[in-house]
Amino acid sequence: MKKRGIIVGGIAIVLLTVGIIFLICYNPDKPDGEADGGRNSMQTVLRIEDAEEIHIKSDTTNIRFVKKDGYWLIDGIAPSEVSAQKINALTESALTYSTDTVLDTAKLSEYGLDAPSLTVEINAADGGHTVTVGKKSAVDDAYFALADDVAFTMPASQYAALINDTDYYTSFSRLSIDADKITGIKLEYPEKTVDLYLPDEITNYEGNVWRMRSPYTTLANDTFIDSDMLEQIASLTLAKKAESLGEERAALTVTTEDRTYKLKIGSVNGGSVNVGYEGGVYSEPAELLAFVDADTFSFVNKLVSYVNINDISSYSVEYDGVTHTVDVSGSASKQSFKKDGKAADSDKSRSVYSKLIGVMAMGLYDNEPTGDTLLKVSFKGRGGAPDCSVEYKRINEYMSAVVKDGETIFVTGLADVSSLKDELNEYFK
């Protein structure tokens, strides 16, 4: 009895083992014929090293790649308009096919290879080769394929590399501008030019650094340039092609420490703007070029008489028939002041100076007739900084024009000028 029990137990173990193996191997989702394939180590089904042409066709793709002078190109598209990196990756996928599963070719229709979703035709020195791709496997992340009458499973990643359309190869970054290296931005419109620049030497980084050449010679708006222009320009890639520029609204020239970029700003198309660059036309998000449509007032510094106190040796004010002078000496960390030749309190002097240069523009001057001069401020530069002057001239009972170095640029409130005069009277009395 004991011996018989041992035999029965051994038989049970064998049957259980067979059952486990059967369950592991059994897969009801595999189509007929797939289970007959040989799952082995990776083997090369097809490799072509002397190809001259690759033609890829599908319901959504029809691209012909040709090799010229040792380089792969897309037939009918200029070499400069396609990504060489993407084409090189494609040729690797299109000319070499490896697999760990070779399939039975008896029933190709079950693999979808009688009506393939993708066909790759390759012309080489030894003749033509054809690769077709059918259905996706229900079991593995792979597709059923046929290369020169050998059926196999193709990795889904390789299929994805082959199925890309033309837009994929023409989409790549054509422009890369470092925001920290931008030294000049010029916008040329039919009616005006906005020319912004960084001076060759910046003495006071804590002050306003950007300048404007046109349409006015004045300080530019650092805040607007930093928040609405520099990073936006640096984000332009010109990766997506557009059909046409449309109406050219402006020309944008960006100067960096290394080179100059010239772009044409075209029509707005929904949320995009067409941009021309080096003979091509591309589409960029409209928000990156919103500054093109900004008014001139956005580009200029609103402080109508800003001069950094570290750049002057003295200033004088003339109003209501009197003239006062303030001398400034010492370094930025320790300054001393004299008003009308006598020592003055440093804190009060700095406070008055901040109000003197803190008058804000309300808008741009629009050729309104001006009357008498209400206040004139003359700055004497030091350390190579230029002299300059600012005059406030009456326009009407509410507004005054601001004339800086002989150029009338802004208008400001008459009440602001009156308030400044009151501050000066209090300081000089």
Image (tube, rainbow, N blue to C red):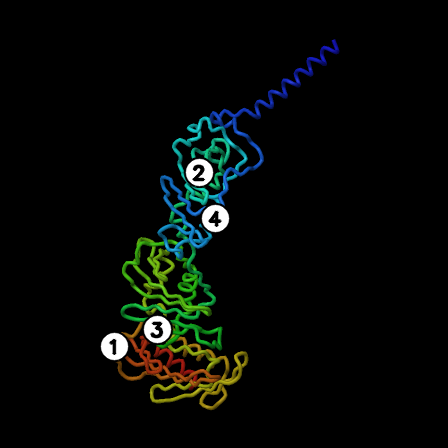
| Residue designated by label 3 | 361
Q: Residue furthest bottom?
A: 341
Q: Residue at x 28, y 80 (%)?
A: 394
Q: Quick one: label 2, few (<14), some, or many (20+) residues within 10 Å? A: many
Q: Name the amino acid, label 2.
A: Val
Choose between 98 and 238: the one closer to the eye.
98
* Percent of width and height locating residue 121: 41, 41
Q: What kind of residue is marked 4?
A: Ala
First in sequence: mark 3 vs mark 1: 3
Q: Position of residue 280 (x, y in %)?
A: 35, 58
Three-letter code, disc 1: Glu
Please name whichever residue, 244 or 352, is drawn nearer the observer in this view of the structure.
244
State which tag comes first along the sequence, 2 or 1.
Answer: 2
Left or right side of 202 for 23: right
Q: Secondary structure at mark 4?
A: helix
Q: Residues within 10 Å of mark 1 (few under 14, many from 20)?
A: few
Residue beneath disc 2: 131
Residue 361: quarter of image: bottom left
**Residue at figure coordinates x 42%, y 31% from the top left:** 112
Q: Which residue is mark 1?
A: 368
Labelled pair 2, 1 in contact (Cβ < 8 Å)? no
Picture quarter with the C terminus: bottom left
Along the polypeptide, which appears first: circle 3 or circle 4?
4
**Badge 3 amino acid:** Ala
- Secondary element at tag 1: loop
Q: Which residue is mark 4?
A: 89
Question: Viewer-nearest of labels 3 and 2?
Answer: 2
Secondary-structure class at tag 2: strand
Above-or-below relation of 137 to 14:
below
